[in-house]
């Protein structure tokens, strides 16, 4: 109410209330004021929103921070000892967020700037997904330990770091096929720096100049001459971008990508795991998973369902 000029009804819905009447009743009960009366106490509307997003522990922020740092795209993302931030586009609305971890309070203090605050509710939901704040991790770890018959594989607090949307996840996966994390990161950096939209950062955030992940249209229209890679890989990138451009609804389901030449199960499943936060993806053909499993010859990943994505990250953590 203090930070935006959003209609009170939209604020109520963004806060999780199903009706304005229920919102008003709770507001008056807690603060002895109506939302309208509270808003009249201030006439200032800041461009930046500040929200507290809580989670249930455990949460190993250090491991998530290391994972994200290894794949960080400067300008698109920023990271520090206790924060992660990035730019994004949601339904053609540009925005940025920076999430500051407050471990003692089991929450993130999140600063959000948006061109249009009407998309605030889904943006907040996606930030929660990217940081995996809604996972019942105690239950997940308990189930994995029971299913596998051992707790030697389980590191407490390991979450699933998400990617903002499934298209970006798919593009990162294609660029990362059969190469190292560092090599894949460098290709994504080249893609974003060359084709991503640039914008001066007017907010005090994670970087001075913001880059946005390239749209399917921008990638589809490029000849990708800046990439030093086989033409077959460039053609896969172009086909994928054209598919996302021309069939945006179908492109939201990675299973539909398998009809595109150059995209196989690993790419689609990686995008499901990080772009959609599917909790039950096991990357059986991933080289890191195969390497980690060498110490567990009798391992049966099927027993880890429906939490095989968490198992995948647990195995990566052992490398």
Image: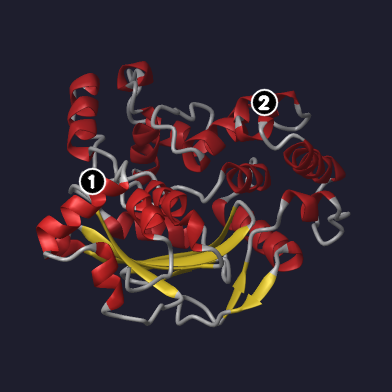
Number of numbered callouts drawn: 2
Q: Write the residue at 29% across / 43% down.
A: 134
Q: In which quarter of the image is the N terminus?
A: bottom left
Mark 1 or 2, nearer chain start = 1
Q: Name the residue under label 2.
A: 256
| Image depth: mark 1 or mark 2 in front | 1
Classify mark 1: helix, strand or loop.
helix
Q: Where is residue 300 in the image (x, y as percent from the top left)?
A: 35, 17
Residue 41 drawn above or below residue 188: below
Mark 2 surroundings: few (<14), some (14-19) or many (≥20) residues within 10 A: few
Q: In which quarter of the image is the C terminus?
A: top left
Mark 1 surroundings: few (<14), some (14-19) or many (≥20) residues within 10 A: few
Q: Position of residue 208 (x, y in %)?
A: 55, 82
Q: Write the residue at 24% across / 71% down.
A: 38
Residue 134 drawn above or below residue 247: below
Q: Name the residue under label 1.
A: 22
Q: Write the residue at 52% across / 42% down.
A: 275
Q: Judge by depth and name the residue closer to the eye, 276 or 248.
A: 248
Q: Where is residue 274 in the image (x, y as percent from the top left)?
A: 48, 42
Classify mark 2: helix, strand or loop.
helix
Give the numbered dot on residue 30.
none
Task: Assess whether mark 2 and mark 1 are in contact (beta carbons under 8 angstroms).
Answer: no
Q: Judge by depth and name the residue closer to the eye, 256 or 247.
A: 247
Residue 246 drawn above or below residue 209: above
Q: Where is residue 12 in the image (x, y as percent from the top left)?
A: 33, 53
Rendering quarter of residue 41? bottom left
Q: Judge by depth and name the residue closer to the eye, 318 or 164.
A: 164
Q: Write the residue at 42% across / 55% down.
A: 67
How far apart in space, not on screen, are marks 1 and 2 (Cα)?
Answer: 42 Å
Residue 250 drawn above or below residue 70: above
Q: Which colour scheme is used?
A: secondary structure
């Amino acid at each position: 109410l203090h930070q935006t000029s959003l209609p009170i009804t939209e604020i109520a819905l963004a806060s999780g209330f199903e009706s304005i009447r229920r919102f008003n009743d709770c507001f008056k009960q807690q603060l002895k004021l109506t939302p309208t009366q509270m808003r009249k106490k201030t006439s200032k509307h800041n461009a930046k929103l500040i929200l507290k997003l809580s989670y249930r522990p455990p949460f190993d922020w250090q491991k998530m921070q290391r994972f994200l740092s290894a794949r960080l795209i400067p300008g698109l993302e920023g990271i520090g000892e206790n924060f992660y931030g990035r730019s994004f586009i949601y339904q053609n609305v540009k925005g940025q967020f920076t999430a500051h971890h407050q471990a003692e309070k089991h929450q993130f203090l999140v600063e959000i700037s948006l061109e249009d605050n009407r998309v605030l509710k889904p943006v907040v939901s996606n930030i929660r997904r990217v940081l995996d704040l809604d996972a019942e991790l105690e239950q997940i770890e308990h189930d994995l330990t029971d299913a596998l018959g051992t707790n030697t594989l389980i590191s407490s607090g390991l979450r699933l770091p998400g990617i903002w949307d499934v298209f970006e996840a798919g593009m990162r996966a294609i660029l990362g096929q059969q190469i190292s994390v560092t090599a894949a990161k460098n290709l994504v950096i080249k893609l974003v720096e060359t084709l991503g939209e640039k914008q001066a950062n007017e907010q005090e955030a994670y970087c001075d100049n913001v880059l946005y992940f390239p749209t399917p249209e921008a990638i589809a229209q490029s000849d990708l001459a800046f990439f030093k890679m086989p033409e077959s890989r460039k053609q896969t990138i172009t086909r994928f971008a054209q598919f996302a451009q021309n069939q945006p609804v179908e492109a939201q389901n990675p299973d539909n990508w398998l009809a595109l030449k150059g995209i196989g199960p690993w790419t689609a499943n990686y995008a499901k795991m990080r772009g959609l936060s599917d909790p039950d993806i096991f990357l059986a053909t991933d080289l890191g998973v195969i390497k980690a499993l060498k110490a567990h010859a009798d391992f049966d990943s099927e027993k880890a369902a429906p939490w095989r994505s968490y198992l995948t990250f647990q195995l990566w953590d052992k490398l």
